[in-house]
Image (tube, rainbow, N blue to C red):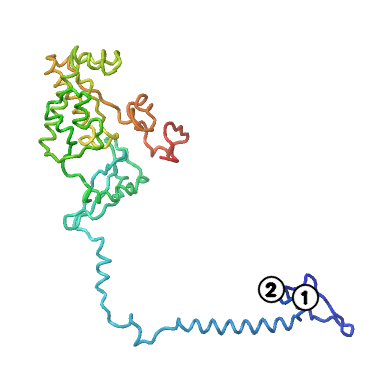
Amino acid sequence: MIRGGDEARASTNGGAVSDEKPVVATGLGKDDAEAPIPRRQFLQWLGIGTAGSVLALEGACSFLRPAAEEDNPLARLVERDWEKIYRDQYRYDSAFDWVCSPNDTHACRIRSYVRNGIVVRSGATYDYQDYADIYGNHATVNWNPRQCAKGYTFHRVLYGPYRLRHPIVRSGWRAWCEAGFPDLTPELKAKYFFDRRGEDVFVQISWEDAFMCIARALDAIARRYSGAAGAKRLLAQGCQPEMVAAMGGAGTRTVKMRGGMGLLGVLGKYGMYRLNNSLALLDAKIRGVGPEEAKAGRNFSNYTWHGDQAPGHPWVHGLQASECDFTELRSSKHIIMDGKNLVEN
């Protein structure tokens, strides 16, 4: 390393001050560690090194010189049909809008693009500002774009190799159904794999058989736990007397259904609630009571009995996280947040 002195070392020559300021060279040999080098000699040495560097850089840049016209591949007529594939990858034949609800509560309206009868991609509609209710209130443009990565790739699930395209049922459960749903003694639990369901296998059945198995199961449950005999069975199984008394003798009250995530489609999700309510017809047939005394199954709230998403919400507001619109944050002067962690959610 070469460094200069902290202060100029002036030498006198006939009363005049010389500009020969020696430079101390370090990092040299032992005997030369403190040998001074005149500044003019150092600058001369630096100029030679710089000139050598310039020559080396000029030689390296020679590789960047343009090729001769006859050797330039872009100047000749070349085959460029491959570019059509690149430019044509987003072409589509038609498009349609639908509500995307793979497994969340947002229900985004998105647009899917069809090519050769297959959905090739999805995207946002960018028209939320045009939505309005019967009172003329319009949604905000800030909802755009409205779609997550799961929604963007949902068509891959539809065409994927692991999509379930037919009903399946556990083999042991189907054998139990075909046997007429006998009481599950320890021996029968082992026979029908109720004590080790993870070791059982699933078998494919038809839709007709699936509906029939479900109907037979609901009928068997309602009959087994109706009346005094049903109440006795429940007490023997450890159910609380208050709960058994609240059933009113209706075995259908032991059926509890949950309609899935909130607001994810009236038919696909809340259809479970409709089915559960229709069990009042089954109770009327089993117990022989009229419409006023018939009891349906119990509907579980979407969030009340599962997850970590503030189970107090349904008890206070009637529905989980649906008491306000998130867009009101933009027009609010004072915000009180309860039951939601915006950092994690």
Q: As displayed, is residue 226 above or below residue 260?
A: above
In-front residue for pair 221/150: 221
Residue at the disc numbered 1: 34
Q: As displayed, is residue 73 above or below residue 233?
A: below
In-front residue for pair 75/200: 200
List the single residue furthest toward the left: 208
- Disc 1 marks a residue whose amino acid type is Glu
Disc 2 crowd, CA 10 A, few/some/many (<14, 14-19, 20+): few
Residue at the disc numbered 2: 1
Mark sitting earlier along the chain (1/2): 2
In which quadrant will I find the C terminus?
Answer: top left
What separation in Å lies between label 1 and label 2 (alpha carbons)?
Answer: 12 Å
Quarter assignment of residue 238:
top left
Which residue lies at the image location 12% right of the left edge and 38% below the top edge? 207
Instruction: Indicate the position of residue 248 as horizontal and vertical percent values.
Output: 22, 13
Indicate the secondary structure of the residue bearing disc 2. Answer: loop
Q: Is residue 211 left or right of residue 100?
A: left
Instruction: Indicate the position of residue 306 as horizontal and vertical percent values.
Output: 34, 31
- Disc 2 marks a residue whose amino acid type is Met
Instruction: Indicate the position of residue 321 as horizontal and vertical percent values.
Output: 36, 32
Task: Determine contact: label 1, label 2, CB under 8 Å.
Answer: no
List the single residue furthest toward the right: 15
Q: In this view, does 82 lie to the left or right of 175?
A: right
In-front residue for pair 196/254: 196
Instruction: Indicate the position of residue 107 as horizontal and vertical percent values.
Output: 29, 41
